[in-house]
Image: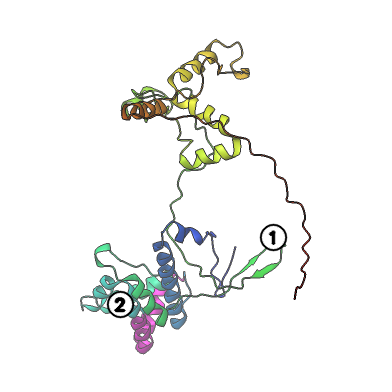
Amino acid sequence: MPVDEEGNRADIVMDPNSRVNRMNISGLTEQYINAASRDVGKRIRKLLGIDQGDHHAKTKVEEIFYQNPALFLQAWEYLIGYYKIIAPKQDWWWTDGSMDDEEKIEHIANICFDHIYLYIPPEDSPEYMEAIKKIERSYRPVYGPVEYIGYSGNKVKTKTNVRIGSMYIMLLEKTGDDWSSVASGKTQHFGVIAKLTKEDKSNEPIRAQPIKGVGETEGRIFASYTGARATAELMDRNNNPSTHAEIVKQILIADKPTGIKELIDRTKFPFGNTKPLQILNHIALCAGWKFEYEQKQTPAPYKPYPAVNYRIQNKK
């Protein structure tokens, strides 16, 4: 995985364009602030000469506080300056005079042992864009080329700068590694597949909620890849109560339900009778108009234009 010039290694590489395309810019703000907090803590540890994870951090900070108070004050003011920019509430806690020296020592020791934790409640958050400008001037996090092992097995260094910073990520249970189908979807009073109620969920040992397989985008993709008939077949089986009932019947009476050659006889159950389409046609009829089907015309085969030689003749 990529690693920056200070040894920060990435755990996940994410597509940066999705932040802009989905207008979720605040994620970049979170990454930037967390990177700044990481580097501020690292600079404080370097200033005091304490390694991260050192179990004697508090003892060492106490020694610095009593033997070299100027050094401790330098680290403390550097930290409070950062809090003043990005965490106003936290800055107020430490500067209102209620915290004693022992609490300051313990706070610096915790940062040296672990890292900085920010408290930024929504009702008391800074103007982030202005805060980031201030952080850039005095607390700028690492931002430069990163190195990684490419597919060739060789180390590669990026030409552009990359910032590595932490983010809170919740892993959703959206991995398609289990069953997601039903024998026969439940329908509502119009004959269209419906969402289950709380009572329905408890009536069966399995979840009988069919997935939403075809939205507007998926329908266009199906039509472009499989053609109009396959898409119509899929839509009709799900939204036509007659077709739905016939499918269940044919599966139940078949000698080999897993080897049915033709499940629906389209001469008996033609396309165009799905419930949503029937409702739309009824509304159109009440309004005094209807849809007319126009046979698709096969375009003529492409014939390139014959090559033409042009001759320019100068005339006086």
Quadrant for residue 60, please give it. bottom left
Quadrant for residue 225, please give it. top right
Please give the label number shown on residue 84.
2
Q: Position of residue 314 (x, y in %)?
A: 76, 73
Q: Nearer the viewer, mark 2 or mark 1?
A: 1
Seen at 48% across and 35% down, the residue is: 213
Quadrant for residue 84, please give it. bottom left
Name the main secondary structure of what is drawn in magenta.
helix
User: Which sits earlier in the primary sequence, circle 2 or circle 1?
Assistant: 2
Question: Quick check: 43 left or right of 296?
Answer: left
- Taking the image as drawn, is residue 47 in sight? yes
238 vs 68: above or below: above
Seen at 57% across and 75% down, the residue is: 5
Q: Position of residue 221 (x, y in %)?
A: 54, 41
Q: Which residues are magenta?
A: 54-78
Please give the label number shown on residue 81.
none
Q: Position of residue 119 (x, y in %)?
A: 31, 66
Q: Which residue is mark 1?
A: 151
Q: Amino acid at mark 2?
A: Lys
Q: Position of residue 252 (x, y in %)?
A: 52, 13
Q: Quadrant of the C terminus?
A: bottom right
